[in-house]
Amino acid sequence: MSTDRVRAEWRNRVLAEYTSAAHAAQVLHWTIQCGLPDEIHRVAIRIVGDELDHAQLSHQCLVAFGGEDLPTGLDVQRLALSSAAEGPLASLVDAIVSGFCLGETFAVPLFNAMRVHTRHPMASKVLERVLQDEAIHRGFGWDALDALLEIDPQGVRARVQQQLPRNLAEFHRAYCDFPDVEPLTDEERSCGLLDYDRYIETHDITLQKVIIPWFDRRGIELRDAD
Ligand SMILES: [Fe+2]
Ligand SMILES: [Fe+2]
């Protein structure tokens, strides 16, 4: 049986996926405006569709867990990324780093960890689909960053380096600052929820073993930020 916590989690996922679709659409626009390579545009188009699918599939799970009467609480303001005063290139750099080099890169191992204990057939199917797509989205982020570094190596590197500590602090807050709450039940895990200590562990491992080395490879230092 599902619980209020299961319904709240899947409701948040509907909102997060729909928000990702809106943000990906804005990123697509900026990639076109900045003249990134055509293959980057094509993947960005795919990502918008994937995120809309994820939102729809997550909503089906919410309904399956008895949440159909819950309001979605969508905040239209949060569907738009803010533009940088410096222009579209800077806006795109910020969106790629935060949404993809960090967001999607943290998401892959988190969805993988969620999937391990999920037994509910619909939730399993959704997590499997999301996981497959998120690996592509993660790759898109790092490819787009490489394309941006080719356009303006010094400027992009400096901007990323300057903004990373604040960005990383936000992800740390989102994944590691949980109020003191009751541990999950096996039932809740089987509905696709992940234990809070696993969020922290996955965040820390991904930061150290993936994110820091991948930025480092691009000449972007992160040592102050960890
Ligand atoms: Fe997604
Ligand atoms: Fe995604």
Image (tube, helix red, strand yellow):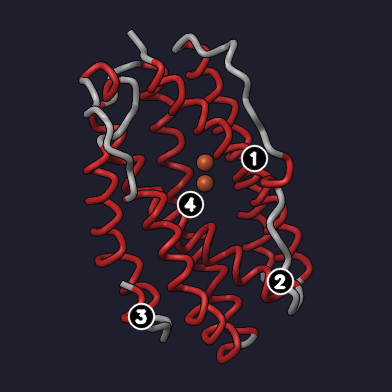
- Disc 2 to disc 3, how far (Cα)? 25 Å
Q: Earlier in the sequence, mark 4 or mark 3?
A: 4
Q: Badge 4 is on which residue?
A: 136
> Of helix, strand and loop, which one carries label 4?
helix
Q: Amino acid at mark 4?
A: Ile
Q: Is the residue marked 3 within 8 Å of ligand 2, measured from its CB?
A: no
Q: Badge 2 is on which residue?
A: 84
Measured as percent of width and height from the top left, residue 173 is found at 39, 54
Q: Horizontally, is 176 left or right of 136 in the view?
A: left
- Disc 1 to disc 3, how far (Cα)? 31 Å
Q: Earlier in the sequence, mark 1 or mark 3?
A: 1
Q: Badge 1 is on which residue?
A: 49
Q: Earlier in the sequence, mark 4 or mark 2?
A: 2
- Disc 4 to disc 3, how far (Cα)? 21 Å
Asked whether the beta carbons under mark 4 and mark 1 sit within 8 Å of each other, the answer is no
Quadrant that contains the N terminus:
top left
The quadrant holding residue 195 is top left
Measured as percent of width and height from the top left, residue 142 is found at 48, 67
Q: Nearer the viewer, mark 2 or mark 3?
A: 2
Q: Nearer the viewer, mark 4 or mark 2?
A: 2
> Of helix, strand and loop, which one carries label 1?
helix
Residue sitting at 50 percent across and 33 percent down? 13
Q: Earlier in the sequence, mark 1 or mark 2?
A: 1
Q: Amino acid at mark 1?
A: Gly
- Can you tell which mark lies on residue 216? 3
